[in-house]
Amino acid sequence: MTDTPVRFGRRRFLTTAGALGMVAATGGLASACGSGGSGGDRIKIGYVSPVSGPLSPFAETDEFIINSVRDHFANNPIPVGGRTYPVEILHRDSQSDPGRAADLAADLILNERVHMILVSSTPETSNPVSDQCEANGVPCVATITPWQPWFQGRGGQPDRPFNWTYLFFWGLEDIEAVYADMWDQLDTNKVAGALWPADSDGLSWGDPATGFPPAVAARGYRMVDPGNFPTGTQDFTRHIAELQRADAQILVGVPTPEDFATFWRQAAAQNYRPRIVTIAKALPFPSAVEAIGRPLAENLGSDVWWSPNHPFSSSLTRQSSKQLGDAYTAATGRQWTMPMAFIHALFEVAAKAFASVSEIDDRQGLSRAIATMRIDSIVGTLDWTRGPVPNVAKTPLVGGQWRAGARFPFELQIVSNAQHPDIPTAGRLTAL
């Protein structure tokens, strides 16, 4: 993980000896589903995610999802051009480092000869992997990254779409609307304090022209921005003092789980307690909330990308959202997390793309299949023909709060569904 945005791709076309030697450095994470001979006898899919490092909560359910998908493909090979193919999934750990993510993607392309790459979890992973695929002409599908940091952050233009790389997730306009709806549910002084890291997300979300400030101003809120901070910051005294001086009764940000835990403990020690906290990236995960513990974590708010109560089902396994969440808990004893459905959906998209071509090596056909795809998935309807920009399909977003649970220490309750009333709520926002 770096402290400043890192951009890869056409400027860094990795065909170096280091990239070519990554097979030895990444041993142990690749494993196969099904049987077969050479790469031409099976579909090879690479998947990159942050299994370790500061972003590791995003990948907490990866092993379960990948194993369940492998089991599905073992019994249901993908039909391509009149025959079926076994599927090999090669999983790589970016260690939450953008440079490593780029190198791993280069290795999957140049050494493993994968037919497609899937990637997830924040611009620090999705962007460098996508850039490698774009530079090398390999179909790639990314998720769990807002579309602006992924599309605009990589130099995308509406009139000049990418040729090989695609994304499904929500955008800043969606989370701005969800958070503002949550804020509107309580009486405050309408001053929102910012917690923006010095990374791609933080710079995009805090952009004074295109980020949160103008969007929330249109809803009658004023933002106070103490400045971007490096990932791994250990002392937030200056930020807390500025938020206290401004009497920021709302806190919003997009820090890593570790950084938010550090900030929030220091804020409590310095008697800064806003009425509303809505934090992305750090708070979608029960493990991160449990690490903060009671009473500090009670009623912390987050965006909700998916839950077992969402009215969606898998096109691959036909599981409902509830069945997927229950299966994870039954197998692991742990609570469901939002990323699990999006990782599952990556393989829904991949399977449909391969089933749409006549040869597994038809890269252009795979890319066209994704560009024109509409699929009802476990995270909702994905439609790349609708935009908001080329290469992007949107997913629904609602808002929730962490509250003391019956089965688990904290359970996420949906409190805002103004944008998607088909997703049920469990109440309204409660002040800290």
Image (cartoon, grey):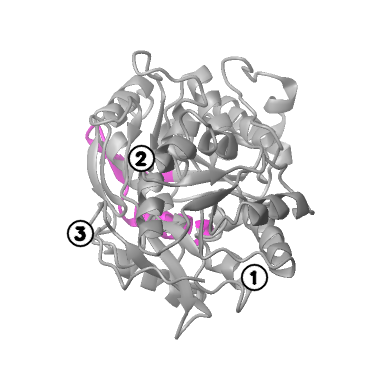
The residue that mark 1 highlights is 291
Distance from disc 2 to disc 1, alpha carbons, whole Å, reads 35 Å
Residue 260, image quadrant: bottom right
Q: Amino acid at mark 2?
A: Ala
Q: Which residues are magenta?
A: 62-87
Residue at (25% x, 58% y) in the render: 313
Dot label at residue 384: none
Badge 3 vs badge 1, beta-carbon distance below 8 Å: no
Q: Amino acid at mark 3?
A: Asp
Rendered location of residue 383, percent (x, y): 25, 37
Distance from disc 3 to disc 2, alpha carbons, whole Å, reads 27 Å
Mark toward the viewer: 2 or 1: 1
Q: Is residue 268 above or below residue 183?
A: below
Front one among 358 and 22: 22
Rendered location of residue 305, percent (x, y): 39, 54
Distance from disc 3 to disc 1, alpha carbons, whole Å, reads 32 Å
Residue at (34% x, 70% y) in the render: 428
Residue 324 lies in magenta, yes or no?
Answer: no
The residue that mark 3 highlights is 422
Q: Is residue 366 visible?
A: yes
Count how many numbered circles sit on residues in the image: 3
The residue that mark 2 highlights is 350
